[in-house]
Image (tube, rainbow, N blue to C red):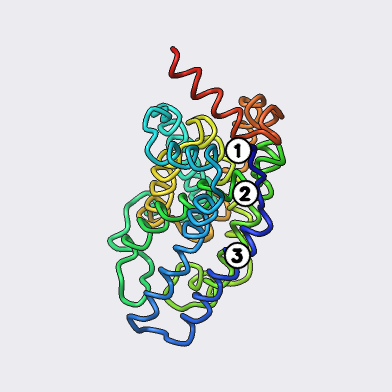
Amino acid sequence: MKYTYRPVRFYLTVFGLTWGFWIAALFVKDTPLMFVLMVLGLFMPAVTAVVTVLTSKNRMLIDDFKRKIVGFYRIKPITIVKAVAVFFAAVLISIGISVLFGGSPKQLSFTEDFSFSIGGTSALLTMVLASVIEEVGWRGYGEDAVGSYHTWFNETLIFGCIWGCWHLPLFLIPGTYHYTLTQLGPLYIINFMLSTIPVDFLQTWVYVKNNRSMLATAIFHLFLNVMQEKIAITPQTKCIETLVLTGFAALIIIRNKELFFEREHIGRLLEVQEAKDNEKKLQ
C-alpha cells in the first residue's frame, strides 16, 4: 500500500511538544525537574516519528523504519570516515585562518571539560542523547517526509532551516550551549542558525550514501557534537567554520550531483528503497 508522508502535521506536532517542554523548563531552572523536561523535549521528534510510523499501519513504512535502525548492512563506513575527515579539516582550516588574524593557537588543544551542563547533568550524556534520539526522529520520519516531495538538495535546505528553528527555545534556557551564545551577541546566534544548513548537507550525504541508515547519521552526529565541544575552538572561529563548511558542502554537492538532484525517489521513496533492498538480497 502506497504511503503519503505528512510533513506539516509531523513538524507542527514536534515543535508543539518540544517547545512546550522546553518552555516549561524555564520555570524550574537549576532543578532536577529542569533536566527531565529538557530530555522530554529532546525525545519528542523520536516519539512523534515512532508513533506516526507504527500507527500508519503501512507495511512498507514500518519495515523501512525497522531496516533504518537495525539494517547494519546499509552502512558504508568509508562514507562516515570521509564525512568525519571533511569536518575535521574544516575545523583545522578555520583555526588556521583565525590564527593568521590574531587568534590563539591554543584552539588546537582539547578542552578539559564541556562548556555547559543542564540541571547539573553531564554535557556528555546530553550530547549522546541528542545524537542518538534526534536521529530517530529526524531520519526516522522527518527528513523523509520532506524528501519524498523534493530532491535531496532542496530537502536539505528546507530541513536545515527547520532544524535550526527547532533549537530556538534553547537560547532562553540557562545552562545550554545556545544560552551561552546569547551572552556573546546576536552575531553568534545568527551563525548557529546558518551553520545548520552546511552541517545538514554533510548529514544528508552520510544518510543517503548509507542507504538511509539512522545508525550512520547518529555516529556522525555524535562525532560532530563531541568535536565542537572538546576542541578549544572559540565562538569567533566558529563563524569562520560556518563559511569553511559551506565551501566543503558546495564541493560535496558538485561531486555528488546525482545524489542531490536525482528525482527518481520523489513520490515513491519507499518503493525505490524497497527495490534497492530486494536487489541487494538477490546479489
User: Do the residues bearing badges 3 and 2 touch, measured as CB atoms within 8 Å?
Assistant: no
Residue sitting at x 47%, y 69%? 41
Residue 273: x %, y % from top left: 56, 29
The quarter of the rendered structure image containing the N terminus is top right
Q: Residue flagged by tag 1: what amino acid is it?
A: Ala
**Residue placed under numbered mark 2 in the picture:** 197
Position of 92 relative to 280 (above/below): below
Q: Residue flagged by tag 3: what amino acid is it?
A: Thr
In the rendering, which numbered label is found on residue 13? 3
Tag 3: Cα neighbours inside 10 Å, few (<14), some, or many (≥20)?
some
The one of 158 and 251 positioned closer to us in this rendering? 158
Residue 219: x %, y % from top left: 39, 43
Q: Quick one: label 1 or label 3, which is nearer the N terminus?
A: 3
Mark 2 lies on a secondary structure that is helix
Alpha-carbon span between mark 1 and mark 3: 30 Å
In the rendering, which numbered label is found on residue 249? 1
Tag 2: Cα neighbours inside 10 Å, few (<14), some, or many (≥20)?
many
The quarter of the rendered structure image containing the C terminus is top left
User: Do the residues bearing badges 1 and 3 touch, measured as CB atoms within 8 Å?
Assistant: no
